Image (cartoon, rainbow, N blue to C red):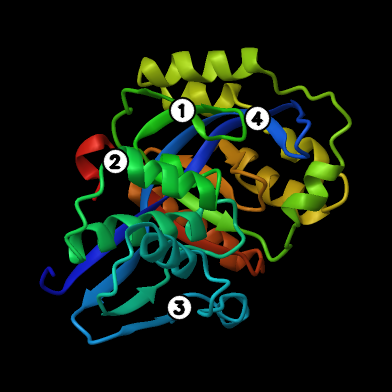
Amino acid sequence: MSKSFEQLGCSKINIGLAITGKRDDGYHDIDSIFQSIRLSDSIYFAKHHSVVFSGGAPELPDYMQNLVTYGESNLALKALRAIQAYTGCKAGAAIHLLKRVPVQAGLGGGSADAAAMLKGLNKFWDLRLTQDELLTLGSQLGSDIPFLLHGGTARGTGRGEILTYGRSPQPHWLLLVKPTTSVSTAAAYNQFKGNSKATSETIDTVRKHIENNDMYAAFTSSINTFEELLFPEHEELAQCKEFFISRGYPTIMTGSGPTMVVLLEKATDALHLQDEISKAGHDWLSLITKTCTEEDLP
């Protein structure tokens, strides 16, 4: 058993997302570029005679803290149970999850926690599971988890679990802005009628720009099918994106929303925009972060 330590779980953004069809199993096929970002939750592991799991999110707004449960429905705890079932390990651990990633925001926070739990327990309990074994366990828990176990920059197809990795661009500053509107991913998918402006050709273009380290072009050429599905019914989402576009900042929605990702040239731009958000009277949560290179990943 390892000494006490912290395992980070980096979240992600989607740079372009195309829903390309509905599957026979009821899920949808997508095509998207996944990019790790530095905004992370932390899982702390310490020696204990039995497994004790706790958590908290003191840095997040109260309404968001209330969305998180730390019982058996928590995805990180499900990952722990999966490890126990797969290995038969009976060891104990005092485990605490500290959440910083906004909840239900399209940033993969819960999946990142599950990935961090798998990696952390593998080290803490000295299980010596291979990366392939961790990926298999992760894929059984959620479509985003295989990418979040590896991290970096990858094109995801299928349900998002079929991954083709590429070279990560240089780090870029981002402002993540979550409007107060909540959206149901399942309900949004159900609105998909088979057509979208976003296609695999769109994602081809985004990928080429990222390979050329041109994030500006990647953002401005990307399209997210969920914007087409959600903006007509949720005026605040379209308003939030336009707030930054009208000020000259390339802005995309990540995942199934509602978080907008604003591309910046420097960190001081984020501080300026946070001040403008406040002056405009918008109750939007905003967080400053950067994209990850392979060297940044835990």
SS class, disc 1? strand
Question: Which residue is more in the foreground, 293 or 96?
Answer: 96
Q: Which residue lies furthest to the front in this view?
A: 88
Tell me the element at label 4. Answer: strand
Q: Are marks 3 and 4 in contact (CB under 8 Å)?
A: no
- The CA span between labels 3 and 4 is 31 Å
Q: How far apart are marks 2 and 4 (CA)?
A: 24 Å
Q: Which residue is drawn at 68% across and 29% down?
A: 29
Numbered tag placed on residue 30 in the rendering: 4
| Image location (x, y in percent) of residue 46 | 20, 79
Among numbered discs 1 and 2, the one appearing first in the sequence: 2
The residue labelled by disc 2 is 131
Report the Cα–Cα distance between label 4 and label 1: 12 Å
Give the label on residue 54, or none.
Answer: none
- Location of mark 3 (residue): 57
**What SS does tag 2 mark?**
helix
Earlier-in-chain disc, 3 versus 1: 3
Q: In this view, does 286 lie to the left or right of 150?
A: right
Q: Earlier in the sequence, mark 2 or mark 4?
A: 4
Residue found 30% across the figure and 37% down from its top: 171
Q: What residue type is labelled 4?
A: Ile
Which of these two is toward me, 236 or 91? 91
From this view, report whether residue 51 is shown above or below residue 133. Answer: below
Q: How crowded is mark 2: few (under 14 residues within 10 Å), some or many (20 or more)?
A: few
User: Which label lies toward us, 1 or 2?
Assistant: 2
Q: Which numbered disc, 2 or 3, marks the residue that appears first in the sequence?
A: 3
Is label 1 in contact with label 2 (beta carbons under 8 Å)? no
Residue 291, position as x, y percentages in the image: 36, 41
